[in-house]
Amino acid sequence: MSATVLSVTPDFFAEVGDVDLSQALDPGDLVDIKEAFAKYAVLVFPGQHLTHEQHLAFAATFGPLETKLTVYREESRDQAPGQIEDLSNLDVDDQIRPEDDRVRQMQLGNRLWHTDSSFKRVPARASLLYAREVPPIGGHTQFADLRAAYDSLSDELKERLEGLIAEHAFRYSRARIGFEDLSAEENDDLPPVPQVMVRTHPESGRRTLYLASHMGRVLGLPETESDALIDELIAHATQRQFVHTHRWRVNDLVMWDDRCTMHRGTAFDDVRWRRDVRRATVSDELNTYEREGIAVAAE
Ligand code: OGA
Ligand code: MN
């Protein structure tokens, strides 16, 4: 039986059944999944039983894998390979992180709207988050459709955004939650990088916003105007008509397109309940302005 794609929303969110991601995929299934991914941007594969290696092998069919961020580099829990990013609330000894734990504090930044790795020169193309344990209440993940959000902008604003470049940095999103405890070395490792604010999604040809709480400054605009524009765009793009909430079940693998969506984790009592979610991340090939054919003068 071949993979079944069931739309949850008309063109943003779909569930995929009749496929076992622990096995090498049938070429026909892979084509169907890639087509669905180009159309929807977020796919859920329920009921998957994956080792880290199987999780990574499926992710690698979409492109080169990212390695774990240096700021989070601790010893891996259960010997997870270096390409598995640990988004759980568990430490190396598999215990719930206490309130004042540094990694926990830093991870609270994931509750802000963002797209993964926009603070890297070559950002993420796709993220694949797999849940082994989920809390009984809260701890959902929300997704915003930045293609639909772009389509609904006024022509005037669309025009204004053409060719604009914003600087993104890990420390900008952490500063928004009041986390300033990054070492000079950690900051040097992740310097601000330029990204376009509007881009074309290659597989669908759709124009899309490209936004994240990692944004600090729109180049060429005065600071007040830049801050106002960033806030206005994030508020616009996360109105409820563009947002879908995923309520996790154990063994869900959720795959999203980082080039045309934002996401955020919702609150839960993370010093009480275990939430074991781990991510494999597929890197894009080019910086966003190289892909759009835009020259950045001041670097
Ligand atoms: C991520 C992320 C939010 C969540 O995996 O990149 O931001 O709900 N996750 O865990
Ligand atoms: Mn994320």
Image (cartoon, rainbow, N blue to C red):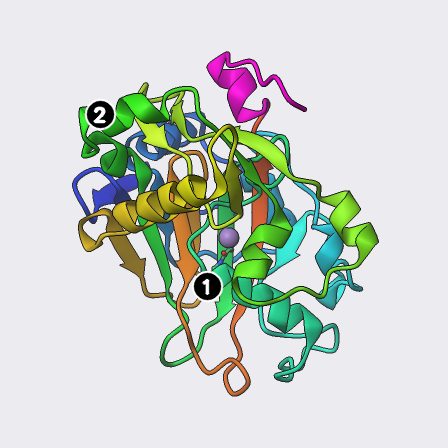
Quarter of the picture holding the N terminus: top left
| Magenta segment includes 298 | yes
**Amino acid on which disc 2 is placed:** Glu
Which residue carries the number 1 mark?
111
Question: Is residue 278 among the parts visible in the rendering?
Answer: no
30 or 122, nearer to the observer: 122
Q: Position of residue 211 (x, y in %)?
A: 42, 40
Q: Where is residue 130 in the image (x, y as percent from the top left)?
A: 50, 57
Question: Is residue 274 among the parts visible in the rendering?
Answer: yes
**Amino acid on which disc 1 is placed:** Arg
Question: Within 8 Å of ligand 1, the CB of disc 1?
Answer: yes
- Dot 1 surroundings within 10 Å: few (below 14), some, or many (20 or more)? some
Q: Where is residue 140 in the image (x, y as percent from the top left)?
A: 37, 66
User: What residue span does the magenta drawing correspond to?
Assistant: 285-299
- Dot 2 surroundings within 10 Å: few (below 14), some, or many (20 or more)? few
The numbered dot on residue 156 is: 2
**Residue 55 falls left or right of residue 93:** left
State which tag comes first along the sequence, 2 or 1: 1
Residue at 64 percent across and 54 percent down: it is 85
Quarter of the picture holding the C terminus: top right
The numbered dot on residue 101 is: none
Mark 2 → mark 1, Cα distance in angstroms: 31 Å
Residue at 61 percent across and 71 percent down: it is 105
